[in-house]
Amino acid sequence: MKKIIKLSMIALAVNLVAGCATTSDVEKLQSQVESLNTSVAQASADAASAQTAANDAAAKAEAAEAAANRANRNINRNLHKKFKKKSILNKKLKSSMMK
């Protein structure tokens, strides 16, 4: 019971101190809130800009990957043709040497 009374007295004291805020205190807090709102708006704009840049970079990376894959396929196709042609020539050369 004594503990409850002590806690009640502490709560009453805190409420009294908190209730004594002056107009200048409220104005300072309002100024801080407005400053924080401005900072939050700027951070949101920066985040949106960063997201746009990240999306652009991802699109460019995908395009570069697609181009590299096409180039790889072309190289492989050309090498295959050359090896196939060389193989045919080697077979002809061997067959002509055997005659």
Image: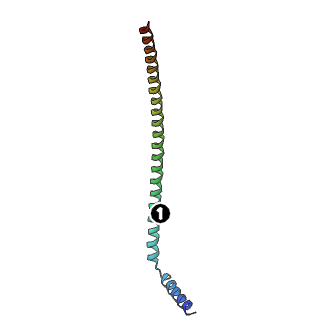
Residue 24 percent across, percent down from the top left? 44, 76
Residue 31 percent across, percent down from the top left? 44, 69
Quadrant in the rendering for residue 71 = top left
Q: Nearer the viewer, residue 67 or 74?
A: 74
Classify mark 1: residues with Cα within 10 Å, few (<14), some (14-19) or many (20+): few
Q: Quadrant of the C terminus?
A: top left
Residue 69 drawn above or below residue 88: below
Q: Quadrant of the N terminus?
A: bottom right
Residue 32 drawn above or below residue 74: below
Q: Which residue is rendered at x = 56% and y = 89% of the image?
A: 4
What's under tag 1, amino acid-wise? Asn
**Mark 1, residue position:** 37
Residue 28 percent across, percent down from the top left? 43, 72
Looking at this view, name the residue that lies furthest to the right.
Answer: 1
- The number of numbered discs placed on residues in the rendered structure image is 1
Looking at this view, name the residue that lies furthest to the top.
Answer: 99
Q: Nearer the viewer, residue 78 or 54?
A: 78
Residue 53 drawn above or below residue 39: above
Residue 42 percent across, percent down from the top left? 45, 57
Q: Which residue is rendered at x = 43% and y = 9% of the image?
A: 98
Looking at this view, name the residue that lies furthest to the front.
Answer: 98
Q: Which residue is rendered at x = 49% and y = 81% of the image?
A: 18
Residue 73 drawn above or below residue 51: above
- The local secondary structure at tag 1 comes to helix
In this figure, which colouring scheme has been used for the structure? Answer: rainbow
